[in-house]
Amino acid sequence: MAFIAYYFHWSHKEIMELEHRERKKWCEEISKINRNVNGEKEKKNIFDVF
């Protein structure tokens, strides 16, 4: 939850209203964004969830 809240500035309520599957998907998307911003393709970012 903190991962999503930090990057998207969503409230606790908004995040908790998501199904677990949706929260997991958003974590994956945030990790992809971070890899692209950092120019990383193969290397894992320490913040990657998956």
Image: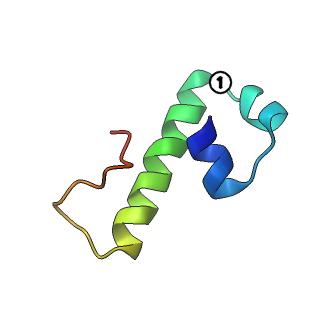
At 68% from the left edge and 55% from the top edge, which residue is drawn? 8
At 73% from the left edge and 35% from the top edge, which residue is drawn? 15
- Which quadrant does the C terminus fall into? top left
Compared with 16, 4 (above or below) is below
At 70% from the left edge and 29% from the top edge, which residue is drawn? 18
Compared with 19, 3 (above or below) is below
At 74% from the left edge and 27% from the top edge, which residue is drawn? 16
Q: Which residue is mark 1?
A: 19
Residue at the extreme left: 42
Q: Residues within 10 Å of mark 1 (few under 14, many from 20)?
A: few
- Which quadrant does the N terminus fall into? top right
Three-letter residue code for mark 1: Glu
Q: How is the image coloured?
A: rainbow
Residue 38 in the image: x percent, y percent? 35, 73
Relative depth, front residue between 38 and 29: 38
Residue at the extreme top: 20
* Image mark count: 1
Indicate the secondary structure of the residue bearing disc 1: loop
Figure quadrant of residue 7: bottom right
Q: Is residue 18 left or right of residue 43?
A: right
Residue 3 in the image: x percent, y percent? 56, 44
